[in-house]
Image (cartoon, coloured by chain):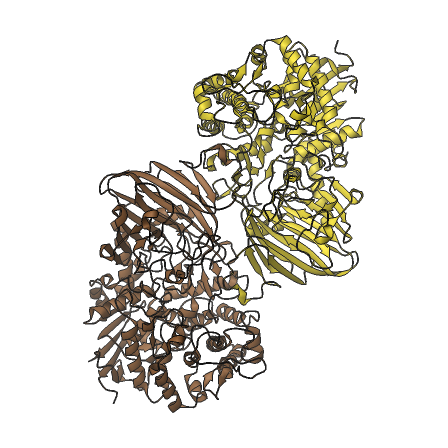
Chain colours: A brown, B yellow
Amino acid sequence: MINKFLPITLLFYGATAFAQSAKNDKLTPYVKPIIGTQRMGHTYPGATVPFGMVQLSPETDTITYDQNGKYNPDVYKYCAGYQYDDKTIVGFSHTHFSGTGHSDLGDILIMPTVGKLQLNPGTASNPAGGYRSTFSHQNEIAEANYYKVKLDKNNITAELTTTTRVGMHQYTFPKSNQAHIILDMVAGIYNYPEKNVWTYLRVLNDSTVIGYRQTNGWARTRSLYFALSFSKPFIAHGFKNFTSGSVYRGFWGKFNQTKNFPETAGKQIKAWFDFNTAEGEKIDLKVALSPVSMENALANMKAEAPGWDFNKIREAGQQQWEEQLHRIVIQSKSRAEKENFYTGMYHAMINPTIYMDVNGDYKGLDQNVHHAEGFTNYTTFSLWDTYRALHPLFNIIETKRNADMVKSMLKHYEQSPEHMLPVWSNSGNENWCMSGYHAVAVLADAAIKGNGDFDKNEALEACVATARHRDYEGIGEYIDRGYIPDERSAVSVSSTLEYAYDDWAIAQLAKKLGRDDIYQEFIKRSQNYKNVYDPKVGFMRPKLADGTFRKNFDPLTTINQGFIEGNAWNYTLFAPQDPKGLIELMGGNKRVVRYLDSLFTMHLPDEFFAETEDITRDGIIGNYVHGNEPSHHVAYLYNWTDKPWKTQERIRMILKKMYGPTPDGLGGNDDTGQMSAWYIFSTLGFYPVAPGSDDYSIGSPAIDKAVINLENGKTFSIIAKNQSDKNIYVQKITLNGKTLNVLTIKHSDIMNGGELVFYMRSSHK
Amino acid sequence: MINKFLPITLLFYGATAFAQSAKNDKLTPYVKPIIGTQRMGHTYPGATVPFGMVQLSPETDTITYDQNGKYNPDVYKYCAGYQYDDKTIVGFSHTHFSGTGHSDLGDILIMPTVGKLQLNPGTASNPAGGYRSTFSHQNEIAEANYYKVKLDKNNITAELTTTTRVGMHQYTFPKSNQAHIILDMVAGIYNYPEKNVWTYLRVLNDSTVIGYRQTNGWARTRSLYFALSFSKPFIAHGFKNFTSGSVYRGFWGKFNQTKNFPETAGKQIKAWFDFNTAEGEKIDLKVALSPVSMENALANMKAEAPGWDFNKIREAGQQQWEEQLHRIVIQSKSRAEKENFYTGMYHAMINPTIYMDVNGDYKGLDQNVHHAEGFTNYTTFSLWDTYRALHPLFNIIETKRNADMVKSMLKHYEQSPEHMLPVWSNSGNENWCMSGYHAVAVLADAAIKGNGDFDKNEALEACVATARHRDYEGIGEYIDRGYIPDERSAVSVSSTLEYAYDDWAIAQLAKKLGRDDIYQEFIKRSQNYKNVYDPKVGFMRPKLADGTFRKNFDPLTTINQGFIEGNAWNYTLFAPQDPKGLIELMGGNKRVVRYLDSLFTMHLPDEFFAETEDITRDGIIGNYVHGNEPSHHVAYLYNWTDKPWKTQERIRMILKKMYGPTPDGLGGNDDTGQMSAWYIFSTLGFYPVAPGSDDYSIGSPAIDKAVINLENGKTFSIIAKNQSDKNIYVQKITLNGKTLNVLTIKHSDIMNGGELVFYMRSSHK
């Protein structure tokens, strides 16, 4: 089970001579997990395998509210637990979101120390006051499925690697008769005193511990079970419950529970394990996770990581990454380009995450344990982000996996008490974060593109039920009026726009299934975007229940203007399902070109910039906010005007400006891979402007050559002749030798295999 | 599954002509569940089937600490949720201990109301301020598996009945367009603000709700899952979370969650369901429980109570009680005697309780879900109480069930993180309440008496591992020194005495299995009782680590004298395994007779009485405390002196004084049936002074005739010729026609069937 995808990938790589040779070139050296860990990327530098259930990574700070209820305004920085600028590491925990803009997780924090036992983490300004340690980036290595750091305070080297469900730690200690490994069950990301609902620990023997952490956070009712195994028996262990206030202790006082007691339970538990270590002695430990039970966690460990060969686990995981990265092999003279691209591939293939034990058990939305029959269950669906380019990318390079993700969403729908498809789901929970019901776009896109053996009629039923859920976020008013009144919702305009797009996607699915009744209903709804456009001001604008537009309106500001993560300038362009209609609505070609030009070139005053969430100043071009997703299709809209070369220009500008192979290389949250998927598509020269359509819109390829190794054994090559930083304009395109006379290619063009040749030049004329 | 024991019982009742005829006499009319509900009995008046997982009963008050942390000094009265003197009923919950002296449970409280919705229970002094109602005993009926009461405030009649795993309610409403059924997930027995760890509710459809309640109480980490079904669809429902302080709400605010929302989760949840009712309209509801999952709760409901015939459920449960009560059929001219006896039988067969779903799933001590293979899993083992007479009673009339209880204890041992047999276990948890490790006596007694197909060697291993657990409550010191030093434990003397008895029981089991090594170890330990006897004062007495007796000592006081629930006067007689040796130790026959006489006749000054726990003034005879268990064998000790007639006299006095067919008819906590089992044995004329021995010590039978219908198809009859309130002395005994020359009968004498005839007279001479 260590490399469950190995047989499949070997099979299709074996099918083409190219892949065979490309396979010899290692691509993992181009993966730099450290990209995005500085400022707003919200990625983590630690170890994980593709779509792994374990994300084992260092925490540099995580607290949301301290014990006094004091809010930490910096908490947002710590969505992934790690900030590059920090000087201390608190410990290594096993679950992390990659690139999100809200957070949770950070479970089961482990920290090795020597000397006097300290159970509080200490502070960044005074690491000596707790168990945390100083560190420096000179002593830090972050690779795909491998992380290494020297913990300076105690001269301990920590190395981390993973399998799908097991995190493996290797700690190299100095000589000490006071070596400790701390297990902090209180720690967590976006933590606060009431977040832990309950924790349980049981010491099975002198080298095995099991337990669970039950939390109430972004995931409202979540339990994570684990099994922890040490390579060396500990000589003593202890527990402490840090719950403030009164704790019911019953008659447990008959035992001395603080030292070598076999179990504990409570809300705020920390444990420690004592060792004597020789100089340079390595102590390994493995932590297996399960969404279902401690027994399953033990079984997961046995199945995936039975032994103690750290390097074997590391290499097996890196081999998994090699297989994944080889799905698109690029040629580029620029190492930076390769690092950007393969790190993008890496970040795109972290999420969604597997949420299932080796035996197929998982926890459902209904709080019951289910067994996945014939599919792998996934979670971490940040769909507002990922419907745009990440799932479309999977529809090319990960069709089987994407079909399993669709099946996971359909199970979510079946098990959801609200009978809705996921909005933002994690760990058997729905958190309702962000807007729209974009799972429908993922389902429609997969169906339209012919991917997956999921039940299309069930998918349509789930889409329709979700889109007709009148009680959810203004849907009832939207159905009745064709828009959400400003009185009903603080994000009435963006939700109206997003629903309209989603409805179009449902209509496409209905059409494919011959359900004309549903097609008619939803194709009509898909035009609702027009209802919030105010031709007088030329923007989408909050509309009141009485049909008039709200007076208080500023198209530059993001706050309280009826939009989420975007201002009117950006959101007005959100009708990816109907660019032609939108252009007409906005006054035609000329006006829209001018609008787009203005967007990319105007200066957004600081007062408004401050309101854009998740974004550094680098994450913005003019007033175009690439760091947030609503504009991800915008640069491609020139293709529907008479200035498609401007698409090419803007794309190259965004690629250059927004992505770099440095810790601060992401201009905004990576958003579980959506930012990276945008990068991958745009680098290849095309983009799925409207998932649910089988068209890709042409941009400007930024590499010399790319070969997509398809799961069906075919390859699709993209060659950009003469491309360079200057030669960014497309003169001519041939597809399999024939000149392409449109600015789109079809999904089938790719999947049938072939060659797409761009002839690039330095001028658009 | 409604009456899972029916086939077995029919089989053996069919085997004897007597049983066939006795079966026609209904015995349930003699069961008065109201006995013990006043003062210290701690029984509950509600509905349950034999050993049922559901105990559906009214609560009159339950709070331990209020929201302000204020302690309610009356909480102890409410161990079973109900006090006869109270004037109001808060609601009806589904789990109750019977007769305990500490508490927990009271889960899933239901209350019907009409008029304005009120979600707080109100207070006893102001029931109008909440949902509780006044009631009177005139409008109350409590029978085996049936409870009825009129809720005066709203003129609603409530009726309750159960199956093993399902509680069924029938509410007769007045005409109202504001009828409500309240589901209070906050309510509980021994409740306090932090007791609820988490609760979850989900409305499946307009008449079905599922959920769970997770608590931290006497059972430290406990979850109870349930499914609730209404006979009539509700027209609306709502939830409210009463958690004080800040609650993380995430993005759930997109919905209006207060009205008709399908789910909720949190710590302090209450729900309500609205109906319109016609005058006299009945609304039924069923609540099925599961220790494992909501799905299993639904399956339990389907299996045990698929329909809506309240009377059928009631009658099926009462028929189960008939079968159980017929295991001993007595003849007595006194209705009071029959009520005492059959209510005793009833109270003896409530606990332990089944803890397993219909499919065999249960939650283990290791917090994992297990499947019971080939046995029924039980919980609620109050072993300090029940090893004395309740399990010995089961070894006569419930051998198969007792073997399953033993198997449940062995599974407990296997699954226990501490690798110990249960001390006081409930709901997959150990609470360590009370002293000793008396499960060993239950195991030894069952093995010695040849009952059950459990693995005897495994049982011995479990006993030995438990008794050698050095870290538990002074066992290490006990092993090293032969007694527990006073410095180590506040109950050093009683624990030393109890361990010595338990060790003797282990020795008996070892002997039976031919394990002489273990026999020698434990028979030696069983003499340790002598180590805490101070011949200078003639009492068992706290001994210091240096081997001297503690100076501060008062044999009358119960507090801080080295004893639990008993003073030195009572505990000094605790060596049931060796009455002969004890008498010798205490100075011989004459001194012990005088000691016993003094015990029963002295006056315990009020200052000392106040310290006896659980006891009303009626629960004490002289200084003999029958309401607590340590003296339960004491009246039989005269049998080892030259005054056995005094045993007969004392037994009859205790039977008369301590038991009556009235709400205040129990002189102390019934202790999950131990008090009742004492009554049953003593009424029949013999008692198991030392479980683990196959001897029963002769007392004075208090009925004219009793027939024990054994599971092996045989009957054992006890005839007390000429017995009356005056003729309490035994002149002669014949067993199967032969004169008995000893004051004991053997277990085999009973199990082989036969006739024991007592010839009674009014004088001992």
Q: Which sits in the foreground, A518 or B580? A: B580
**Which residue is found at the position 37% from the left and 88% from the top?**
A594
- Among all residues in the image, which is located at the extreme left? A333
- Measured from the top left, where is residue A369 in percent x and y? 49, 53
* Residue placed most toward the observer, A188 or A242: A242
Q: Is residue A103 above or below residue B146?
A: below
Indicate the position of residue B518 as horizontal and vertical percent values. Answer: 45, 21
Q: Which residue shows up at 51% across the image and 54% down it?
A: A368
Viewer-side residue, A445 vs B627? B627
Nearest the viewer among A658 and A361 is: A658
Quadrant of the image containing the C terminus of chain A:
bottom left
In the image: residue B518, left or right of residue A24: right
Question: Which residue corresponds to the image point at 71% horizontal and 53% vertical from the top-left?
Answer: B129
B285 in relation to A453, above or below: above
The residue shown at (22%, 84%) is A761
Residue B607 visible (yes or no): yes
The number of numbered discs placed on residues in the rendered structure image is 0
Q: Quadrant of residue B7?
A: top right
Left/right placement of residue A489 relative to residue A272 reads right
Q: Seen in the image, is A195 located left or right of residue B338?
A: left
Q: Is residue B345 above or below residue A524?
A: above
Q: In the rendered image of this protein, does residue B577 appear above or below residue A363?
A: above
Residue B699 is at least partly visible in this image? no
User: Where residue A111 appears, x then y in whole percent?
Assistant: 33, 47
